[in-house]
Amino acid sequence: MALTDAVQRYINDGCQLSIGGFTINRNPMAAVYEIIRQGKKNLHLYAHSNGQGVDELIGAGCIARLEIAYCGSGRFAATCIRFRKAVQEQTIQVEDYSNYQMSLRFMAGAMGVPFLPTRSGLGTDIIERWGFSRSMREADPHLPDQKVCVIDNPFKGHTDTQQVVLVPAIHPDVTVIHIQKADRHGNARIKGLPFVDVEQAKSAAHVIITCEELVEADELRENPDLNQVPPFIVDAVVPVSHGAYPTACYGHYDYDPVFLKHYAALAKNETTYRDYLDNHIRASATHEAFLAKAAGDRLESLKADPATGYARNLDRR
């Protein structure tokens, strides 16, 4: 279906949303920009270690709550700028976990179990410092009663581990991921590192996939072991070229260092950032229109080398 229809149908104000990708790799940016255009509000966002997608959603005022391990865009914003500002000014509520804890939380959601155990977090303030208060948890049925739970190991005779941390499952209303190939039935193939996208998709009630290529089912039936996302969990397949731009999509194009550097400068100033939202995102009816304004003829220089999956001779400064 069309991207506008997918966002309008499945992403509602106040819903629990998860987006895939990692820092500046395979963020579902076309969907992010459409969420901003449609003015979605009060979203509860889950992400593993994301960058540009999370930062732009926060900057546009779409996010009320965030659960995440890390929010940064590499050397361009080691800590994302609008994210940092929102945390400092307390305009969003944030609860942080380790990378591994977030992976396990999505995995628990995908498995249909209420929690998974780990040693990750023992001896750290992640255990003690909660972003969501007990009273908030009691008032919201979507929040677990506790951030984490530390228990004594019930199988001490089989290991030296004395305690484990139980991390609660995540069950988003909607997960959005951007991938390389999909067919119209929802079979999906990720090339390169999958990050936690597969678990994020399997943990959600609804799944929107944006893809670089919409291919015939017969193509994905060859080597079916390479298809990570099954069709029966997918609600919408949206073909959109350069749907991860300005982040990278392995095997297709690299991230755009010129845009990311320019964005970081704009994001530090309230006036220039509001102008960016109005002139680049809201004034662009489609992702293609956004690409024309943001990238222009640079797209060709970002094209991935087939042998490496990345752009050759790209000036990453």
Image (spheres, rainbow, N blue to C red):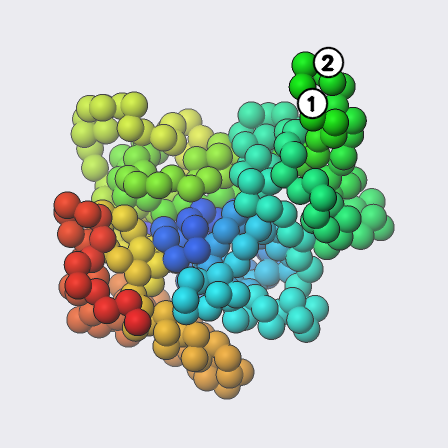
Q: Amino acid at mark 1?
A: Asp
* Mark 2 secondary-structure assignment: helix
**108 horizontally vs 182: left or right:** right
Front residue of 235/228: it is 228
Residue at 27% x, 35% y: name it: 183
**Which mark is on residue 212?**
none
Relative to 180, does residue 81 appear above or below in the rendering? Answer: below
Relative to 78, does residue 104 appear above or below in the rendering? Answer: above
In the rendered image, which residue does mark 2 sit on? Answer: 157
Q: CA distance from mark 2 to mark 1?
A: 8 Å
**129 horizontally vs 235: left or right:** right
In the rendered image, which residue does mark 1 sit on? Answer: 160
Residue 143 visible, this angle: no
Q: Position of residue 111 (x, y in %)?
A: 56, 25
Q: Position of residue 308 (x, y in %)?
A: 19, 47
Residue at 40% x, 74% y: name it: 263
* Mark 1 secondary-structure assignment: loop
Point out the image quarter for the C terminus: bottom left
Q: Position of residue 184 (x, y in %)?
A: 29, 35
**155 horizontally vs 240: left or right:** right
* Label 1: few (<14), some (14–19) or many (≥20) C-alpha neighbours in 10 Å: few
Q: Amino acid at mark 2?
A: Gly
* Label 2: few (<14), some (14–19) or many (≥20) C-alpha neighbours in 10 Å: few
Residue 34's image quarter?
bottom left
Q: Position of residue 9 (x, y in %)?
A: 48, 48
Residue at 83% x, 48% y: name it: 134
